[in-house]
Amino acid sequence: MSSEQYINLLKPLDLGFTTLKNRVIMGSMHTGLEEVKGGFHKLAKFYAERANGGVGLIITGGIAPNWEGWVKPFAAKMTDKSHVKEHKIVTKAVHEAGGKIAMQILHTGRYAYHPMSVAPSRVKSPITPFGPRQMTTWDIKRTIRDFANAARLAKEAGYDGVEIMGSEGYLINQFIVKHTNQRTDDWGGSYDNRIRFPIEIVKRVREAVGDDFIIIYRLSLIDLVDEGSSWEEVVQLAKAIENAGANIINSGIGWHEARIPTIATSVPRAAFSWVTKKLKGEIDIPVCTSNRINRPETAEKVLADGCADLVSMARPMLADPQLVLKAATGRSDEINTCIACNQACLDHTFSNKTASCLVNPRAGHETDLNYFPTSKPKKLAVIGSGPAGMTFATIAAQRGHDVTLYEKDKEIGGQFNLAKKIPGKEEYGETVKYYARQIELTGVKLILNKEAQIDDLENFDEVILATGITTREVNIEGFNHPKVVSYIDVINGTKKMGKSVAVIGAGGIGFDVSEFLSVKDPEHLPSVQEWLAEWGIDPKNEARGGIEGVKAQIPPSPREIAMFQRTKGKMGSKLGKTTGWIHRSTLKRKNVKMIDGVDYLKIDDEGLHYRDADNSIKVFKCENVVICAGQISLKNLQQPLLQLKKPVHLIGGAHIAAELDAKRAIDQAARLAAIV
Ligand code: NAP
Ligand code: SF4
């Protein structure tokens, strides 16, 4: 697609007193830099790179209007002049880069991760260990003043606007919904009373900041929880928020406690834009859509289809700060696409680590990880073109090294070529495409179908072994039985699977393989309609909360599957913090058995014999047994190279195979390529 074809995406948006240069908003994401020493200088660089990359408006991570509303103790808040000074570092950098930035005001309410949390009523959230205190009338009035104060200070700090976080189940949302607001005073009871809190906030914020300041209100368009708002209520609130003085309504999709995925990679692209479209005709101010819009083509289509006036992309801006610029200059094939894995962004945030990006380890590290041109170009050989090899080769070549990349297979990609075949993980193919283009652009000499030998490497200054892994064999009687197959053969389709399958190993690959085996056609990409039906979401959003009374239509698994692990306890406990539950839920819905705490006894014609956690001997009768028991490093060339006294570096799975991890591999490769 050429730049002219992004006609809607690149169109400016006139808000009367200010103009956004295009229709792309960088959505709010907590980076964790807000709370570290010197973090605002790092944040300034982080946001300035995104502003430089052409995004129309940046929204910061959530900043609390008072201490009760902060995400965790000592998280960022905007309550006095000392905060203004820090934030000015950020706004100045963004403005100098030609961008605009709004500060998100977020009061977490009962989602706060501290024991002093407050909420409209004393109803504990299912996702935090702390029960909230019920707010008094005085608390409510004070909190409204605190929102207005935070907005006034944000203006003083040089922000172009604020976003009031009214969705995702945070405090404002807790007032709106009956389940969390059981008050009987003026702030609870009827819907009119329950929405008094957000309306008052927007009014008071507008009074505090004047007319020439952007107010975005993030409104929960589909709560995806029981007793959520009805569509009529959503529209009533949107109209009231418009009247109270907001300039833009941003779409909130689902509460954090909802047990329906809303941004994971298995959610189809732009799966919720139709919800925003429903609101668009109801109000006059611009509406912004969000969730799983990761490519400019998708964003353009959403806008061209009249779903929204703006699109919000948060994680895609971590993956590629130049997304808009590349689209605008006819280089969308150079975009490093967010694969929606959550592994280095949200999973980091929820583990108190700086948010970064699996496919772009520079994200959040702009001040300490840079790829400067080298002053000493070297001749480098990279062996293996999996995630680590591709990353190293392209960054090193971009820095000016002479890089040759050897791949024994017929194509680049390594383990990502398996990952992209797993239903719901098709996005991993985008990373392979990105590197293929980078190899062309940076002049890496790619040699396919060639297993590099020691003789091939003599003339190189240094060798980087990114040779990856081989599968771990298991020591179980009957391991050589014809029904035993490796996960690689299953995913590549080289072995046909029977109607009943035992999966040995319940790590990331065991889950992937079980998901692969539990669908009829792993190559079928579900449409948005099919996906909504599968998760029990009303495609018209007429049901309360988008789900009440809607029965999920789960296509049955074509085979009986049982997953096994020797460790006692929950299966998939090492999967991503924000995505593990989705994988578990997906398999449970397909009736996949999860059997932990086993001892494997033997595999024979009957099936897999094991001793279970209660010491009973059992057999799972099955036609196939798939081994997903982890990996071991492949580094055969290391010793011969050392004997030649050739500098050799091990990266990725060749370095550490245990819990082989693309995030670690790419990060390690990028950091080595930055200094080699
Ligand atoms: P893994 O996470 O290390 O899991 C290996 C599994 O094999 C464990 O369940 C382990 O359980 C079992 N196992 C280990 N040694 C065994 C032996 N000798 N005999 C029988 N069972 C054995 O490895 P993986 O599943 O191959 O995944 C590799 C990595 O890829 C993951 O850690 C992750 O980083 C990444 N990945 C992630 C995802 C995701 O998050 N969705 C998906 C794919 C890949 P017991 O020891 O308890 O039996
Ligand atoms: Fe996207 Fe994964 Fe990067 Fe997060 S870590 S921004 S989800 S690619």
Image (cartoon, grey):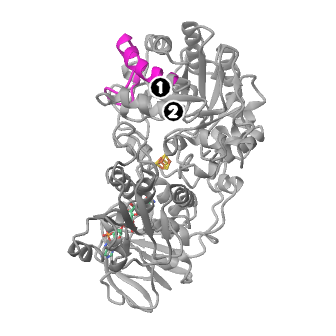
Q: Is residue 378 magenta?
A: no
Whether disc 1's CB lies below 8 Å from ligand 2 is answered: no
**CB under 8 Å between callouts 2 and 1?**
yes
In the picture of the structure, the residue carrying the numbered disc 2 is 28
Whether disc 2's CB lies below 8 Å from ligand 2 is answered: no
In the rendering, at what x and y percent does residue 134 appear? 42, 22
Left or right: 588 in relation to 542: left
1 over 656 or under it: above or below: above
In the rendering, at what x and y percent does residue 217 appear? 60, 24
258 over 29 or under it: above or below: below
2 or 1: tag closer to the N-terminus? 2
Q: Quadrant of the C terminus?
A: bottom left
In the rendering, at what x and y percent does residue 598 appear? 32, 74
Left or right: 312 in relation to 125: right
The numbered dot on residue 106 is: 1
Q: From which residue to which does the magenta span run?
A: 69-95
- Disc 2 packing (10 Å; few <14; some 14–19; many ≥20): many
Which structural element holds mark 1?
loop
Q: Is residue 94 magenta?
A: yes
Ligand 1 sits in quadrant = bottom left
Question: In the image, what residue occupies the spot 56% across and 24% down?
Answer: 100
113 over 377 or under it: above or below: above
Q: Tell me if residue 660 can be seen.
A: no
Distance from disc 2 to disc 1, alpha carbons, whole Å, reads: 10 Å
What amino acid is at disc 1?
Leu
What amino acid is at disc 2?
Ser
